[in-house]
Image (cartoon, coloured by chain):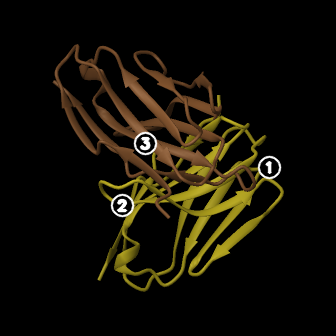
Amino acid sequence: KQEVTQIPAALSVPEGENLVLNCSFTDSAIYNLQWFRQDPGKGLTSLLLIQSSQREQTSGRLNASLDKSSGRSTLYIAASQPGDSATYLCAVMTGANNLFFGTGTRLTVIP
Amino acid sequence: NAGVTQTPKFRVLKTGQSMTLLCAQDMNHEYMYWYRQDPGMGLRLIHYSVGEGTTAKGEVPDGYNVSRLKKQNFLLGLESAAPSQTSVYFCASRDPNTGELFFGEGSRLTVL
């Protein structure tokens, strides 16, 4: 069974700092990998999706990379802002209906 | 554009009671999912559907039933609620072209 791990579970950074969130997975035979943001009491909002044939995706201040061979993905957030405070989850899809989630990294950006 | 809408958002049940959660999506997606989210365990798939009239079991299906009578709606039922089913339930639909998932805002269920 695919296992998805996100370390650290929580992270606090001062405003303006660049940061990297990590996601690792055990089975490299993935269909795609998706990063989500979840605010307290809310649903998940899709941030970036990387297909298995891609190495990275960018959206504004966010950049996600994928290294299938090592089973790793990173989410880079540039110039962090207090509004970036949320829990970030990664999920890997190994088939049409097999999506495995990590438990997330709770990010706090301190003004 | 509403996306994925879940009702109700909050519900409190007593052990043994039944209820149905409704998920509606307006993106004409074939694939729909029901997940539960529990502290420290991430999201786990309960049931899913690959199209109108079809449903299948996910990772944690016991105690739940689902129906997909219309393409836009996916219902999750609890026939006899148990305290272990206290959780936040999320519905999602999937874009067939990109694989991207779109989530509802969640339904928080407490079983006393």
Q: Amino acid at mark 1?
A: Ser
Whether callout 3 and callout 2 share a subunit is answered no
Secondary structure at badge 2 equals loop
- What hue does chain A carry in this figure? yellow
Residue at label 3?
B90
Residue at label 1?
A69
Q: Which of the two labelled residues, at mark 2 and mark 1, occupies the earlier sequence position?
A: 2
Q: In terms of image quadrants, where is residue B84?
A: top left
Query: Residue A39 shows which numbered tag?
Result: 2
Image quarter (top left, top right, bottom left or bottom right) of the N terminus of chain A: top right
Which chain is indicated by disc 1?
A
Q: In terms of image quadrants, where is residue A85?
A: bottom left
Front position in the image: B72 or B108: B72
Q: Say which chain is brown.
A: B
Instruction: Give the side of residue A2 with respect to residue B97, left or right.
Output: left
Residue at point 75%, 44% (across, down): A30
